[in-house]
Image (cartoon, rainbow, N blue to C red):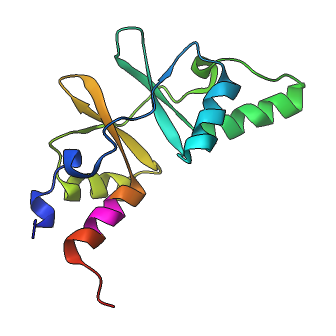
Amino acid sequence: MTLVKEMRARDFMVTKPVLFTRDMDLLDAVSVLIDRRISGAPVVDERGNLVGVLTERDFLKAALVAGYHGESGGCVADYMTHEVQAVNADDSLLDVAMGFAETKYRGFPVMEDNRVVGYVTRRQVLRAVIDTFGTSR
């Protein structure tokens, strides 16, 4: 059995995360979130550098603006969160869990050598803990 303190983000992250670009149409990006049943995804520039995250919450803000001003659409860059908290692929499960406990975020990009190599969510952390300890039913 793997100990929780030995587990790393790379052990339970999504290894092929959805990635958006800044110039992607906002409605197309949100359709991807809905279709893939995810709450957010990293935004990268043309070189693959992390520049933001687009979440359901960001889209809700865009929808409120659209409803108030009668405008719709735009691109990901107009609404994404620019200040991103990410985790390192070698961060422990406990460190990732602490990051979720101390922030409002539901997901973190996972970085290695300054590149996005995965995405991890609260639910994946919970699943990793349950899988490690098993269930008591």
Q: Is residue 118 left or right of residue 10?
A: right
Is the N terminus in the top left, top right, bottom left or bottom right quadrant? bottom left
Query: What main secondary structure does the magenta stretch of the protein show?
Result: helix
Q: State the residue in front, 132 or 59.
A: 132
Snapshot quadrant of residue 94: bottom left
In this rendering, is residue 39 above or below 47? below
**Residue in the picture at 15% in, 65% down:** 4
Give yes or no for residue 48 being in the magenta stretch: no
Q: Position of residue 110 (x, y in %)?
A: 29, 37
Is the C terminus in the top left, top right, bottom left or bottom right quadrant? bottom left
Q: Position of residue 79 (x, y in %)?
A: 62, 26
**Residue in the picture at 58% in, 12% down:** 23
Q: Position of residue 56 (x, y in %)?
A: 61, 42
**Residue in the picture at 71% in, 18% down:** 74
Snapshot quadrant of residue 34: top right
Q: Which residues are magenta?
A: 125-129
Q: Would residue 11 be visible to someone looking at this image?
A: yes
Residue found at the far top of this picture:
46
Q: Is residue 46 left or right of residue 86?
A: right
Q: Would residue 56 be visible to someone looking at this image?
A: no
**Residue in the picture at 23% in, 22% down:** 114
Residue found at the far right of this picture:
70
Disc tally is 0
Snapshot quadrant of residue 55: top right
Q: Position of residue 42 (x, y in %)?
A: 44, 30
